[in-house]
Amino acid sequence: MARGRAAGYDDQRQAILDQAAQLFARHGYSATSMNQVAEACGLSKATLYHYFRDKYSMLVSIAEGHVSHLHTLARIPVPSGTTPSQQLEQLIHRIVAAYADAEHAHRVLTEDVRFLEPQDQARVLDKERQVVAVFARAVVAVRPELDEAGLAKPLTMLLFGMINWMFTWMKSDGALTHEAMAPIVADLFLGGLTAVRAGRGQGSGGANRLQRPRAAAAGGVGG
């Protein structure tokens, strides 16, 4: 009979991932060793290998776990009677709030996805594209004519451009919090969205000039 996992196994595994994400975010995936992760966790290297076979498996778990969480949040059904603008605002709030609790994992997803092997990278990037697609549909619900103009995806990428890099300038102990910034981001985007003229992107390639997210510079959700 197979031996079951000890009580607390999943909690310990997550604690290891949290420490690894912090080290990867601070020093980079390549510069971080299993010894450093074990030391940060207060574990022996042998015990660490009980949870993860190598550093790469940690990277996969961090990146895939973070983007899967964002994917789950993006797909939460909205209450009946929610207007398109309210739906988009709720999506923005959820994602910004998730970034607040996963700063290190988000930095890893943003900067270290290039180290993933092709099959793992493709799986993570596919989840990112699904999240972007949910937001793009929400944008179209607010301004349907933008879809025909080929601007739904570019505008969604601009939105993620605002929120993906907040970790580079927001201080964890600063006056501004993610909770405070979420409505500001929503107001800025939705307020500006109403001013976008659908014909502005015509004649210069429009959506056809939008590059596919590249593995070497995926930039977190949205590419």
Image: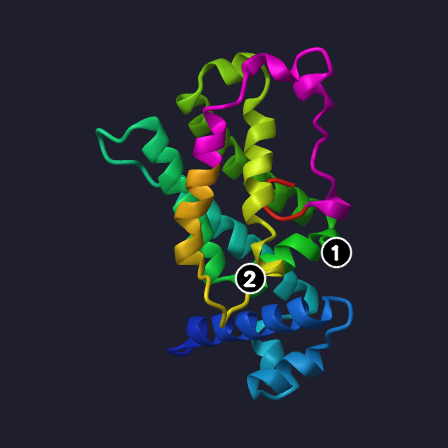
Q: Is residue 207 magenta?
A: yes
From the top left corner, tell me how far across and down residue 222 is, in percent: 60, 40
Looking at the image, is 119 positioned above or below residue 112?
A: above
From the top left corner, tell me how far across and down residue 126 is, in percent: 59, 39
Q: Viewer-proximal residue, 209 or 68?
A: 209
User: Which residues, given as a range, are shown in magenta?
Assistant: 189-218
Q: Answer left or right for 209 relative to 156.
A: right
Q: Which residue is mark 2?
A: 170
Q: Amino acid at mark 1?
A: Phe
Q: Answer left or right for 114 relative to 97.
A: right
From the top left corner, tell me how far across and down residue 145 is, in percent: 48, 13
- Residue 169 is labelled as none
Q: Is residue 96 magenta?
A: no
Q: Answer left or right for 61 relative to 135.
A: right
- Residue 115 is labelled as 1
Q: Amino acid at mark 2?
A: Met
| Labels 1, 2: front one | 2
Residue 33 in view, yes or no? yes
- Residue occupying the point 42% across, 39% down: 187
Q: Which residue is most to the left?
A: 81
Q: Viewer-proximal residue, 222 or 41?
A: 222
Which quadrant of the figure contains the N terminus?
Answer: bottom left
What element does badge 1 sit on? helix
- Residue occupying the point 40% across, 56% down: 180
Tell me how far mark 1 sits from mark 2, CA to CA.
26 Å
- Residue occupying the point 44% across, 33% down: 190
- Residue occupying the point 65% across, 17% down: 201
From the top left corner, tell me how far across and down residue 168 is, in percent: 63, 59
